[in-house]
Image (tube, grey):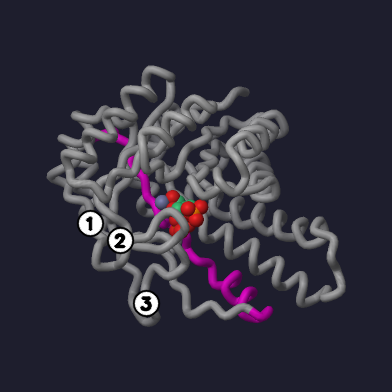
């Protein structure tokens, strides 16, 4: 099975009322944990690489690891650039074998977002690669993504038809109240998403795949594992899984998860060292970290996204 685009995956997901998991990858253990989980439950996968991940691990290493995962699991896997911020970065990923890229022009004025996105779409489509665009701005702070709450903005449904028809994008990320990172809602705040906006967007774009970023649930067991073992994370609140299920049953075909993987890996390694303070062989602590990533991803694929058995 070669690398695939997300075209077929999204078509089936839209019709079947489920979503594909798009998990961020940075190293071998993360890739193995995710792909072994998907293999066990026969789920299609999107593995996504941010500019920061590409800088950390190098394009060629991630590409070869993903190719190895395909050979090992036989799964349909799409390799996607997460939050591409320029034509040059998207081009470099397309030339380097990615099957999907995101061009994130969400911080630009509408017309400029259209212009940049269309430039990427023209190049990508000429090379058999699909493109995700974004309208609206999520809050959240991470390496490459840094948007304060006051700069965040919900997607305006009145803009989506024009954006999609003028750019030719294959999927669209929208802002309905999710955010990047581990602190999505304040302590005591009730998590809420604007499903009315999602509904409006899907009415205007029938059959068109929508993408949800910032969709980690910030699973309390891993935050607790971190804090019980020397960590100091403040109260972290994520997106309830019931809301992700609801989004997946609607027009959302791709759900992005990174922070949950980071928390599972960090919590497991912290606990390992608390229990084995004298150990220093990286294989000893990376093995349980990889295993917990696998269990977490299996849970997401089966219980949340509904894509198990759909590969
Ligand atoms: O949405 C961003 C992803 O979680 C990637 O984060 O830029 O720190 O690799 P990163
Ligand atoms: P989380 O920080 O909620 O995992 O979101 C990841 C994401 O949207 C990657 O693009
Ligand atoms: Zn994102």
Name the residue that disc number 2 marks: 177
- Name the residue rendered at 47%, 30% in the picture: 92
| Residue span colored magenta | 206-230
The mark that comes first in sequence, 3 or 1, is 1
Position of residue 299 relative to residue 66, above or below, is below
Q: Dot 3: within a 10 Å radius of its alpha carbon, few (fewer than 14), some, or many (20 or more) residues?
A: few
- Name the residue rendered at 34%, 30% in the picture: 120
Which numbered tag is attached to residue 166? none
Position of residue 208 relative to residue 226, above or below, is above
- Name the residue rendered at 60%, 23% in the picture: 2
Q: Which one is in front, 88 or 134?
A: 88
Magenta region includes residue 228: yes
Q: Residue furthest top?
A: 126
Name the residue that disc number 3 marks: 186
Magenta region includes residue 186: no
- Mark 3 to mark 2: distance in Å? 13 Å
Q: Dot 1: within a 10 Å radius of its alpha carbon, few (fewer than 14), some, or many (20 or more) residues?
A: some
Q: Mark 2 near mark 1, Cβ–Cβ under 8 Å? A: yes
- Mark 3 to mark 1: distance in Å? 18 Å
Q: Quadrant of residue 125?
A: top left
């Amino acid at each position: 099975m070669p690398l695939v685009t997300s075209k077929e995956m999204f078509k089936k997901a839209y019709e079947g009322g489920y979503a594909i998991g798009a998990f961020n990858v940075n190293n071998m253990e993360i890739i193995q944990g995710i792909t072994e989980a998907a293999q066990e439950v026969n789920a299609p996968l999107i593995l996504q690489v941010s500019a920061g991940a590409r800088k950390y691990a190098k394009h060629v290493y991630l590409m070869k690891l993903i190719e190895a995962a395909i050979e090992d699991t036989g799964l349909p896997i799409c390799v996607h650039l997460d939050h591409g911020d320029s034509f040059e970065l998207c081009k470099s990923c397309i030339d380097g074998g990615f099957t999907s890229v995101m061009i994130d022009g969400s911080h630009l004025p509408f017309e400029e977002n259209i212009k940049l996105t269309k430039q990427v779409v023209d190049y990508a489509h000429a090379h058999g690669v699909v493109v995700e665009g974004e309208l609206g701005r999520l809050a959240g702070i991470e390496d490459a993504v840094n948007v304060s709450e006051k700069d965040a903005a919900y997607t305006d449904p009145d803009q989506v038809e024009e954006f999609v028809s003028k750019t030719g994008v294959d999927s669209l990320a929208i802002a309905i109240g999710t955010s990047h990172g581990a602190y999505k809602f304040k302590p005591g705040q009730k998590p809420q998403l604007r499903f009315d906006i999602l509904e409006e967007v899907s009415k205007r774009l029938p059959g068109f795949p929508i993408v949800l970023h910032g969709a980690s649930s910030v699973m309390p067991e891993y935050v607790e594992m971190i804090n019980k073992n020397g960590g100091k994370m403040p109260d972290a609140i994520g997106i309830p899984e019931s809301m992700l299920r609801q989004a997946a049953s609607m027009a959302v075909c791709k759900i992005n998860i990174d922070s949950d993987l980071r928390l599972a890996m960090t919590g497991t390694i912290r606990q390992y060292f608390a229990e084995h303070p004298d150990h220093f062989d990286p294989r000893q602590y990376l093995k349980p970290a990889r295993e917990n990533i696998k269990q977490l991803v299996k849970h997401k694929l089966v219980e949340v996204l509904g894509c198990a058995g759909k590969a």
